[in-house]
Image (tube, helix red, strand yellow):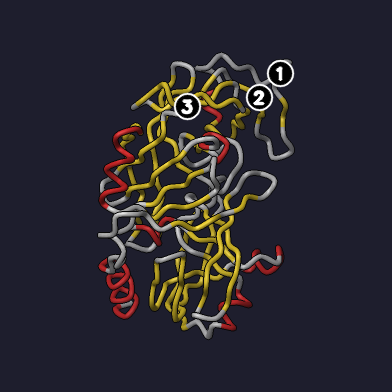
Amino acid sequence: MRRLARVVLALLLTAPAFAGQKKAPTLPFTTNPDGVVIVPVVLGGAIHADVFLDTGAGLDALAPSIVQKLQGKPAGAFTGFRLGGERLDLPLFVIPELRIGPIVKKNALVSAWDVLDQWHFAGVISVNDFRQQAFTLDFPNKQILFETSRSLRDRLKSGAPIPLRFDDERGIMLDLFVEVLIGGQAGLCEVDTGTPDSAFSIRYMEPLGISKDGKDVTKQASGAYLTTVPQIALSADPSIRQMQPKVEFGGIIYDCVLGVHFWSGRSVTVDIPNKRLIVSRAGAEQPN
């Protein structure tokens, strides 16, 4: 455990060498049919792979077959919980290197998740890789920008700063949260680019006047309820909103989750060091 703590501390103290540059380096991304972001990475200095960029993942996860190829060194285990509350026990490993655009992490801490081998997909990267580096998801142009001090100031001139709150577990798992309004109800939502649509706890249905037996409500096989709501807006700037979104109401462990469709059509800067998002006001009212 002392060795694991040293690895985590080294990752937290590593600052990108390009932070003082004037122009933000970029990395193109693609999306799957659900709009989830897929980025190219280099693993161990040799394996080129496409992975999901999932702000709701908490920590990086690779297919066990890739961890084996990289000769990952066991580094303990971590227990987390899925959105529905199911326990998830993940083995941890240290791999020689993880490269995301200009970011290079030596002795990177990752988990191994066997589901990824079943999907024939390399892995998932999380916001853990950006604790010291602000980055922008530019959805209209499908690129990630690794912000510099100057480019970050430019973002603030045209974008809305939105306070971020964190669930940071021992420096291993990190999740991001923002305050939102749905109808007249407030909620603290996880920012989750790994899921298409937004989801709310089932306890919000009654205050919002939504009947489980309503004609516009569909019960899912999971026991959740799918319907549309008039809008979801960010509390810090209600002009940034999604109109008539599809929302799933179910037994989740958070108030709510903002899926990738809420952000599509916008540029969203994740600035963990300054505890904020910067969201472009252009195209602020996004239809579902």
Is residue 31 toward the left or the right of residue 239 in the image? right
Q: CA distance from mark 1 to mark 3?
A: 26 Å
Q: In this view of the protein, which residue sits in the foreground, 216 or 211?
A: 216
Percent x, y of residue 119? 70, 63
Tag shown at residue 284: 3
Q: Earlier in the sequence, mark 1 or mark 2?
A: 1
Pair 1/3: label in front: 3
Is residue 102 toward the left or the right of residue 260 in the image? left
- Element on which disc 2 rests: strand
* Kind of residue indicated by mark 2: Thr
Q: Residue at x 51, y 37 (%)?
A: 263
Tag shown at residue 207: none
Q: Residue at x 63, y 17 (%)?
A: 211
Tag shown at residue 227: 2
Percent x, y of residue 96? 44, 81
Q: Residue at x 49, y 42 (%)?
A: 253
- Element on which disc 1 rests: loop
Q: Residue at x 34, y 47 (%)?
A: 166
* Kind of residue indicated by mark 1: Asp
Circle 1: is it few (<14), some (14-19), or many (20+) Cα within 10 Å? few
Identify the residue at the far bottom of this view. 71
Q: In this view of the protein, which residue sits in the foreground, 59 or 96?
A: 96
Is residue 24 toward the left or the right of residue 244 in the image? left
Q: Earlier in the sequence, mark 3 or mark 2?
A: 2
Q: CA distance from mark 3 to mark 2?
A: 22 Å
* Kind of residue indicated by mark 3: Ala
Q: CA distance from mark 1 to mark 2?
A: 6 Å
- Element on which disc 3 rests: loop
- Asked if the residue under mark 2 is in contact with the one under mark 1, i.e. CB atoms within 8 Å, the reply is yes
Mark 1 lies on residue: 216
Circle 2: is it few (<14), some (14-19), or many (20+) Cα within 10 Å? some
Does residue 241 lie above or below 34 as drawn?
Answer: above
